[in-house]
Amino acid sequence: MPFHLDFAPLAGFVALMAVAAFEDFRRLVIPNGVVIGLCVLWPFQLAAAPGASLITGMAAIGCGFAVFFAGTLLFSRGLIGGGDVKLLAAATLWAGPGGTLPLLLLTGLLGGLLGLFALLPICPDFAGMRRRTATGASEIVANRPHPTVVPYGVAIAAAALIATLPPYFS
């Protein structure tokens, strides 16, 4: 089976989302290079997508800016991490205007499940993160002496893959 260049940006998207999830789980950090890579690859995917137009691209950019602006407000209140905001805005570019709402809903659902999992007594300690918090990291405060930190980038990456990939394989 020949390799189609149409899928090269999509493969990069999958790889970069996996790196973002892994690094956020491991260190509570989403590297800026991952977000930059997602933004650089997106125009190539837009050009390769069937039926894509300049209007579709501009609408995706508008959705990305709206999500970034809302996320910045949440970040300023200490409710979400800065890397999470950037990753979610980049994922919104890839999801496009039609996939933004499913992306946000899936992110909330998966993030909530991840938060509930983090509260379980059998849950892994996310590398000791219950005892130390990263600046701007998402936290769930429970009846514990220390807040529980949730690597929300895992939920964002999973939601981005679920919301973005199916149309390419149908």
Image (cartoon, rainbow, N blue to C red):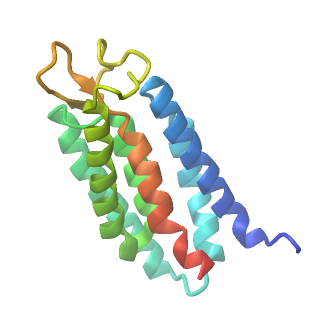
Answer whether residue 138 is visible to the viewer in this image.
no
**Residue 52, position in %: x, y?**
54, 82
In screen coordinates, is 84 left or right of 24? left
Outermost residue toward the front? 122
In screen coordinates, is 15 left or right of 94? right
**Residue 1, position in %: x, y?**
88, 74
**Residue 120, position in %: x, y?**
28, 31
Q: Residue at x 41, y 41 (%)?
A: 153
Q: Residue at x 61, y 84 (%)?
A: 50
Q: Residue at x 43, y 81 (%)?
A: 55
Nearer-the-camera pick, 74 or 142? 142
Place residue 115 in its image quadrant: top left
Q: Residue at x 33, y 35 (%)?
A: 82
Place residue 80 in its image quadrant: top left
**Relative height, residue 45 to residue 81 (above, below):** below
**Relative height, residue 29 to residue 133 (above, below):** below
Outermost residue toward the bottom? 51
User: In which quadrant will I find the C terminus?
Assistant: bottom right
